[in-house]
Amino acid sequence: MEFSFWEDQTWLQHRDALVIGGGIVGLSAACRLAELRPDWRIAVMERSAFGDGGTTRNAGFACFGSPAELLDDRAVLGDAAALALVERRLRGLRTLRSWLGDGAIGYESCGSHALYVPEGMAPVATDALADLNRWLEPVTGIARTFERVPAPATLREGAVVAADWSPLEGAVHTGALHRALLRRTAKAGVDVVRGVEIVAVKPGDPVELTVRRGRSGSEHRIAVPRCLVATNAFARELLPDLDAHPAENRVLVTEPHPTRPSTGTYHLEAGYVYARHLPDGRLLIGGGRHWQLDASGTADRLRSLLTDLWPDAGATAFEWTGTLGVGAVREPIVEAVGPGVLAAVRLGGMGVAIGAGLGREAADLLAKSR
Ligand SMILES: Cc1cc2nc3c(=O)[nH]c(=O)nc-3n(C[C@H](O)[C@H](O)[C@H](O)COP(=O)(O)OP(=O)(O)OC[C@H]3O[C@@H](n4cnc5c(N)ncnc54)[C@H](O)[C@@H]3O)c2cc1C
């Protein structure tokens, strides 16, 4: 189907800034840009109904990294860059909570446990934990960011060999967060145009974009002074030189349970696996890409780990996949990729924490551009 004259003139043309991708980064960036440049006509273009990326399909951890992940970040990035990354995650969470409000995003200040199972990765040594705490104190503001504790009583006895508690992490309701962001975006006067895919971006003055109506409709050219690519895992479809690659993650959610607690988050296997309580006593488990199994092998192993931890987990009610954007390091990319075009992508597995802050950074840069 072709674009009508009205669709073209109302939704596509005459933009001062265009954001490609309606996830947490794209929506946050658009909101911030509208604050900085109230006179600009801003649109977010999103190719699918809800969003194909992590924003509507994630597990809802408001986290900054388990001990094993942070040790890994320090080894790969070095102390200063890894600490700056933790600070960015904590700042992003603060931004998100203050922008949208804890009630609107279903924020639970529930803390988190890093769990170590008998056949899994070894526990972080207690002296390494103490060293992590000293390193983290300047950004977390507390002496014991992590503490070795007895296994949580809700787990099967003997299911884990060690547990590390952090009081600083929390959880959100992923769907409510997305809705709150959309409401804020609408209030800021930004148009979110759905079912429109950007199939090519040509940097320049102006930036030339090829837009498609749906996945198979007609193509159309538009020109804008500036645009932001916020398509995370899908970034290379438009910008093939970026080090941002798709990595699939599988998530399972069980049926409700009448008496199980409804709050609490758990990291396992250096963050490659995650589990949490949900309202109605449901359990969620996800991840497992480090096992390098196929889709059904990953689902079976997640399921078996879940019932090992909570033998009364109950039947699976929902199962889905989502796509992470990953690269050589866990740091996100926010950079100009050509005249008029900025990219803010590669959010990895902690995009809930870092996404709003990254959107803000990108908007600040875009607002200053020509
Ligand atoms: C299964 C899973 C669990 C996760 N759990 C957590 C968690 O518990 N905590 C946490 O912090 N993070 C988690 N993450 C990561 C987090 O969800 C992401 O890092 C974050 O949502 C990325 O946001 P984004 O806006 O950068 O990208 P996305 O949410 O991926 O949004 C990009 C959008 O761009 C759209 N798009 C792509 N190409 C085009 C195009 N050409 N034209 C128009 N639109 C386009 C897509 O449809 C998509 O909606 C998880 C991710 C997954 C997949």
Image (tube, rainbow, N blue to C red):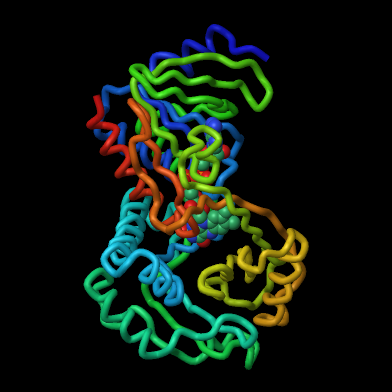
Q: Residue at x 25, y 76 (%)?
A: 137
Residue shown at the point (36%, 90%) measured from the top left? 127
**Percent x, y for residue 284?**
62, 66
Displayed quadrant of residue 226: top left
Q: Residue furthest front?
A: 241
The residue nearer to you, when weighing 184 against 131, is: 131
Q: How many marks?
A: 0
Q: x, y percentage for residue 94?
A: 32, 58
The furthest residue to the top: 5
149 left or right of 156 in image: left
Quadrant occupied by the N terminus = top right
Tell me the residue at 56%/90% (across/down). Answer: 161
Residue 146 seen by the camera:
yes
Q: Nearer the viewer, residue 219 or 261?
A: 219
Q: Position of residue 123 (x, y in %)?
A: 50, 85
Q: Is residue 343 above or below residue 155?
A: above
Q: Quadrant of the C terminus?
A: top left
Residue 210 percent coordinates (x, y): 52, 20
Q: In the picture shown, does residue 73 fall above or below 114? A: above
Q: Is residue 180 visible?
A: no
Q: Residue at x 52, y 72 (%)?
A: 263
**Where, by quadrant of the figure, is residue 342 drawn?**
top left
